[in-house]
Amino acid sequence: MTYDNFPLIDHHCHGAVKKPVDTDSFARLMSESFRPAPEGTDPFLKPLGLAVRKHCAPLLDVDPLAPMSAYLEKRDAVGPEEVNRRFLKAANVTSFLVDTGHCTDELLSPAEIESLSGVPSFEVVRIEAVMETVAGQASSAADFRQKFEALLFERCKNAVGLKSVVAYRCTFAIDQTRPSQSDVDAAFDVWRSQTPEGKSFRVEDPILVRYGLWVGADLARPRRLPIQLHVGIGDPDVYMHACDPTHFTDFLRDMEAWEIPITLLHNYPFVREAAWLSEIFQNVYYDVGVILHFTGASAQRQMDEALELAPFSKHMFSSDAFGLPEFHYLGALFFRRTLAHRLESWVRDGACTINDAEQIAKAISADNARRIYQLEV
Ligand SMILES: [Zn+2]
C-alpha cells in the first residue's frame, strides 16, 4: 500500500512567471533573500539547487544532477509556456488555491494556471493588496474606508479565502484589537502624506493593517471563509523572532469565537508553535509549505516535525510556490514522499493500522482543505 496517490489540494500558492527567466532571475527566484549570493560563490549550491537538478531535470529531458547551466539552457529552449505547463501538470494536484496579491501582472492568474494545469484554480484575496490599490484613489480618509470596504467585498465574491501578511508588515507582536475609526483616519492621513507622489502605496502601519484584518474578518464571518496568515519564512526584511504566531494568540482566540478558520502558512522555523496552536484552538490550521522543497534532501525532518503533535485534521498541504513552476511540482513531490515514508514506517512499526494511515493521508492531502475552504468535490 502506498500513501502518495491521494488527491492533493495545494491550498496556498502563487502564479509562475509568464516571461522567459534568465540565470540571474532564476537565482533570485530560488532565494528568500533580496541580496545576490556573495561574489565568487555558486547561488545554486544549496539544498533547493540540488532538488531542482535532481528532480526537475528529467521533466525537461535533462539528466538528473546535470550542471545547472545545462538545465537552464534547456529550460530556455523549451520556453516559458511549455515549462509552466509541464511542471504544473506534473504537480498532479486536484486544485490550486492562488494568492493573487503579489506581482500580479508578471505571474500567471488563477485562470491561466487552470488552463495550463487542466485542474480548477481558486482565488485567495490578499487584504493588504486591496488596501494599497485604493489608497491613491481616495479623496479623504472616509472615502478610503468606503472604497476599501467596497472593493474587498467585490473581490471576495468569488474567492475561497482571504490572506493577510500582517507578520511581514508589522510582525505579530502588536496590539490585535480592532482600531477605532478616528485612529484609522489619522493613520491614513499620515500614510498618504508620507507616500511620495508617483510612488506605490505600501501599508506597514499596524493600525491600518489591523483595520484591514478586522474588515476581512467581518466579511469572512457570515461565509466562514478561512483567513490565511503568513508566518515565519517568506520575506527577508522581517524581524523573524516577532513573526512567531504565538504572539498572535489574542486574534486567533477572537476568530475562534467568530468560527473563522485561520490557516497558518509555511511556519518555518515556528512549525512546532503553529502545530501547538492548532492543537489548542478549534479554528487553527497549519502547513509546512515552501520549506519541504527548500530543505530538499532534508525535507523528511520538516514533515516529521509537522506530524509530531497536532491533530491530523489540522495539517494541510501547500507548496507556497512563487515564480517558478518547478516549486509547484517539487512542493507536491516532497510532500507526497515524506508523508508516505513516515506513514509506511508507522504501519511497519505497528504505530497505526493501514486504515489509520490512509485516513491520515487523505485528511492532510485534501480533505481538510476541501472542508474548510468549502470546495466542491
Ligand atoms: Zn506565499
Image (spheres, rainbow, N blue to C red):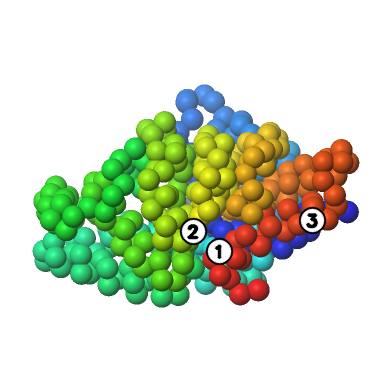
The image shows residue 142, relative to residue 177, as above or below, that is below
Distance between mark 1 and mark 3 Cα atoms? 20 Å
The image shows residue 47, relative to residue 134, as above or below, that is above
| 263 or 19, nearer to the observer | 263
- Quadrant assignment, res 63: top right
- Quadrant assignment, res 6: bottom right
Query: Would you name the residue on which mark 3 appears?
Result: 358
- Amino acid residing under circle 2: Pro
Point out the tag, 2 or 3, that comes first from the N-terminus.
2
| 43 or 361, nearer to the observer | 361
Instruction: Judge left or right: residue 314 versus residue 14.
Output: right
Q: Confirm whether residue 188 shows in the render.
A: no
Query: Would you name the residue on which mark 1 appears?
Result: 372
- Amino acid residing under circle 1: Ile
Specify few, some or many for label 2: CA neighbours under 10 Å numbering under 14, 14-19, or 20 or more: many
Specify few, some or many for label 1: CA neighbours under 10 Å numbering under 14, 14-19, or 20 or more: some
Query: Would you name the residue on which mark 2 appears?
Result: 261
- Amino acid residing under circle 3: Glu
Element at label 2: loop
Residue at the spot 62% in from the left edge and 44% down from the top edge: 310
Residue at the spot 47% in from the left edge and 26% down from the top edge: 38
Q: Quadrant of the C terminus?
A: bottom right
